[in-house]
Image: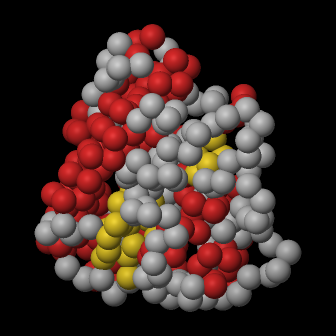
Amino acid sequence: MLGNSHARGGFSERSFLDRGLAERPFNGALPAGQIYELRRYFQHYAELSELRSALVVIDILNFLDTPPVGGAFDERRLAVTPDGQPNPKWWVSDLVLTNLTGAGLQASFGALFNKKRAEPLFNGFRDCTPEATPNRPKRAVAFLGANYERFLSGAYLDEAQEFDWRKELAAMFEEARRRDIRLYVVIPPAHATYYIELEAAGYWPAYLSIVEEAVRIAERTGGNIEIYDFTGFTEVQTEPLRKGRPLTYWRDTNHFSCHTGDLIVALLSGQPAAAADFGRRVTMDNLPAHFDRIEAEKRAWQADERAAYCGYLDMMPAAIREKVPGGC
């Protein structure tokens, strides 16, 4: 599994095992991972293992125009070259410490090389318990307004200068097709406050364009590539943040919980959605209706006096309140 911090902490190993989606799942998601890194690590994993399926989680934060995470990324330490050819000179001796971060990724490579995983070895997945996430108000709202500042100061998607994001997606999809790997591409759910910040910063259309471009490139590539979009304003994305009330679907306004991750994996495995209208496998045929539904959900949430929309606006910086629909 690849992605950014949403994927890194939002899934449990049990979800994949119980639904038969993986025999030895491992979480290779990177904090602040970028699309170029995801594509290169996907090639790397595919070269080193008998990879049969992969889950790639992408959202707008994967397309930031900054150097790769931590400055530790080094092409010479991968088993493949950027064009996907075997790299006989790759540096295995310090691969984990230099190229990958954390015990989870170290365990992932142990599984790849040894074909099995030792039970005590952490494999990159966060423990998931039946209990809801304790609501620590300071953590829960810590990201309110922070993403807005990031969107204003950073360059994403077509404004990025370091890479062509469409080219990176196409290269990853082509690698999956060439190696006959089943590829699940997930646009993850975000808490509704994240969508408010996207809209205020003018990035809402660009965010939706990720979905459309991913579908378009996948259908052009062929192979076994499925695109799932969890953008929306259902009970999951609009779960209220109230003092003293545990959260079911979120760890904070920037990261979903493993309970939400389990709902995502359920849809990937073909099970009925446990939360109404949560997520959709999208194609070019159903995309217009899918986007219309999202907009209708958004307008209904903003107009619902019982919803938390106005309360969230009150907590946001004034610059955000001035740029999104009011009525509060």
Above or below for 164 versus 54: above
Q: Position of 13 compared to 195: left or right?
A: right
- Please say whether residue 93 is visible from this viewpoint: no
Q: Position of 182 compared to 238: left or right?
A: left
Above or below for 110 versus 187: below
Q: Position of residue 53 (x, y in %)?
A: 45, 81
The colour style of the image is secondary structure
Which residue occupies 46% across, 72% down?
Answer: 273
- Please say whether residue 228 is visible from this viewpoint: yes
Which residue occupies 68% across, 77% down?
Answer: 14
Question: Which residue occupies the foreground of this view, 111 or 23?
Answer: 23
Q: Position of 163 compared to 140: left or right?
A: left
Which residue occupies 38% across, 83% down?
Answer: 181
Q: For residue 117, what is the image quadrant?
A: bottom right
Q: Position of residue 270 (x, y in %)?
A: 43, 82
Q: Position of 143 compared to 93: left or right?
A: left
Question: Which part of the image, by quadrant, shows the C terminus?
Answer: top left
Q: Residue furthest toward the right?
A: 120
Above or below for 315 versus 120: above
Question: Which residue occupies the foreground of this view, 297 or 27?
Answer: 297
